[in-house]
Amino acid sequence: MNKVYNNRAWWLILPMLLLVAFSAVIPLMTVVNYSVQDVFDANTRFFTGTEWFKEMLNDPALQAAVLRQFAFSLTILAIEVPLGIGIALIMPKKGWRASAALILVTMPLLIPWNVVGSIWQIFTRGDIGLMGWSLRELGYSYNITSNPVDAWATIILMDVWHWTSLIALLCYSGLRSIPDAYYQAARIDRASKWAVFRYIQLPKLTNVLVIGVLLRFMHSFMIYAEPFVLTGGGPGSSTTFLSQSLTTMAIGQQDLGPSAAFSLIYFLIILLVTWVFYTAIMNMQKDNNKGA
Amino acid sequence: MAEITLKSLAHTYLANPQSPQDYAIREMNHVWHQGGAYALLGPSGCGKSTLLNIISGLLEPSSGEVLFDGEVVNELPPEARNIAQVFQFPVIYDTMTVYDNLAFPLRNVKTPEERVHERVMEVADVLELTFQLKRKAKNLTADEKQKVSMGRGLVRDDVSAILFDEPLTVIDPQLKWKLRRKLKEIHQRFQITMVYVTHDQLEASTFADKVAVMYEGQVVQFGTPRELFETPNHTFVGYFIGSPGMNFLNVSASEGVVWAGDTALTVGHGVCDAIEKATSSNIKLGIRPEFIEVHAAPVEGGMPAQVDHAQDLGTYSIIYLVLGGISLKARIEEDQVTPAGKAWLRFPDERLGLYVDEYRVEIDHE
């Protein structure tokens, strides 16, 4: 076949370009626009340059929120990933039990964020909530509105309950795709259960786990509705995460400039962490001694 | 190192088997002697892999016993049988280097590291993997991976047996030949019992001293490649071994004459007597294409036949003949004249096989 060179073909990418422009570039540019100006009304605005960015980066409340956010995301990842793998490993592989387990595991994923927050809000109430009441009856003065440790533990528990299923389902599908021959070969090689996990199952799960960890990281880094409904960010600001700080600033206080600058910083943090994580994993899989 | 005995072994994948067709392995007895190189040959779905998995312990037989050196091992899992098995598709541990892959079966049983090193280096040398040892197994080509799979079977020098389940399927033809020779070499060097499953007769006969031919869940013949060729015990062996397979004619005898349909065959009295003695009506006369004498001119005792067409395969040709309505194939060497139109055939008595109900019966040639 002859290759025909025709530069008019460039027009063919126009629809894609328009789509991306409306879905990403234009909204993002609005934010960029606000982040470098101080806007008073439709006719009054001043160019501020990097001022908002400096202010945001030096704001102690926001710095604390960033640290809190990292602490939260890393904690839930440290719990959800091993737990999800564990659940996937013990989930039945055949028959009606497999279907039943799948439905049960999937259930929490189907519940909307706000509803999850409300469920846990009621669940943890000391007077009528099953968990709150039980803990009190057991002699522990459980109170998420006054005790930051209780509030933290509850939010983490709630997130684990809501999202471990995602990791479990991803791993379950990953495990199902391992051919029987691998398990047979491992038995022939007299591998222990641990060795089977370490050298067959875990390596085959790497790809789904990368996706799972990335999704869970991004998701948890943006968490908003659940803690907002459950604790409202309190007690004090102990459970105020980044998106809640941002919302308060942008909607509550109408500080458009600083919140635009902050949004961009927020976005860049997620992008950076995701990129570092992804690159690190991909590098780990490379052959270090090519042809040695 | 062990002698493997299969005693009234049968296996079915169904819960309630009704007829013999429901069995993947029909009741059989068989002995694999210590140190032998065996092939298990048969078409797809004849139960070869099932049998192999029963020997290695991946499958438990429905009935009968598997004995290693006289000891029943039915209940033992593969880990406890100390057996190595290489599968059709390469199984490697992705994250490990080639070295670690080869060392894995030894390290699993806590072999001292010096011994591991010694064995791995030896096997890597035999399989020509020495230069790949430090590479991650995941980045190898398919045939290198399969060599690693094989290597994991070979590093264990104390195994009862090594079982190969069509291990060369994914390998290029040229390398296939090399690896087969390598396996043979390894067999001679280590004297381990090896059972090699394949559906390729050439592979079976180049690797094995003795070949077991399987058909519909049964071993129909166990013998040297030569025996399989010259005296097939079962029509299936005749048909499956050789290229092309044996010619079979449905025959009957009356008043001292052997008939194939309406055609009288010129064959010895022994054949006729044997046919008359048979109690079944399913009687076939078999002759290999290599053994049919084809003459371009009438000869004494020659049966006239039509030449349909000939296929030139370089060093020899296959000619397709019609003898009284029955199609036959004959193989003639390149220096022989290929007859055109008409040919005269002779069936040498000592090359004929008589099959009653598909099994060979003796012919007394006097």
Image (tube, coloured by chain):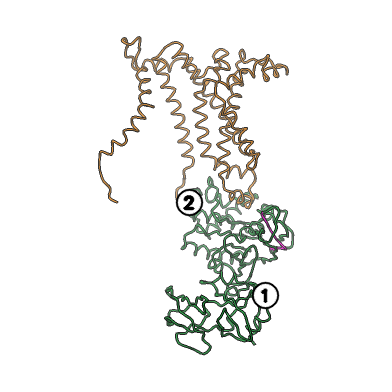
Chain colours: A orange, B green
In the visual, does A131 lie left or right of B131?
A: right
Q: CA distance from mark 1 to mark 2?
A: 57 Å
Q: Give residue B308's position: percent from left, percent from top.
A: 45, 76
Residue underneath mark 1: B280
- Give the vertical position of B56 relative to A33 (above or below): below
Query: Label for residue A135?
Result: none
In the visual, does A210 lie left or right of A118?
A: left
Chain of the residue displaying label 1: B
Give the position of the C terminus of chain B as an image quadrant: bottom right
Residue underneath mark 2: B140
The front one of A289 and B241 is B241
Q: Which residues are magenta?
A: B4-13
Q: Give residue A99's position: percent from left, percent from top.
A: 62, 38
Return the residue found at the far front. Answer: B262
- Give the vertical position of B2 relative to A244 (above or below): below
Q: Amino acid at mark 2?
A: Leu
In the visual, does B337 lie left or right of A141?
A: left
Asked if the magenta segment contains residue A79, the reply would be no
Chain of the residue displaying label 2: B
Q: Give residue A97's position: percent from left, percent from top.
A: 66, 39
Per the image, label 1 sits on a secondary structure element best described as: loop
Give the position of the N terminus of chain B as an image quadrant: bottom right
Cβ atoms at labels 1 and 2 below 8 Å apart: no
Residue B266, located in which quarter of the rendered image?
bottom right
- Give the vertical position of A8 relative to B60 (above or below): above
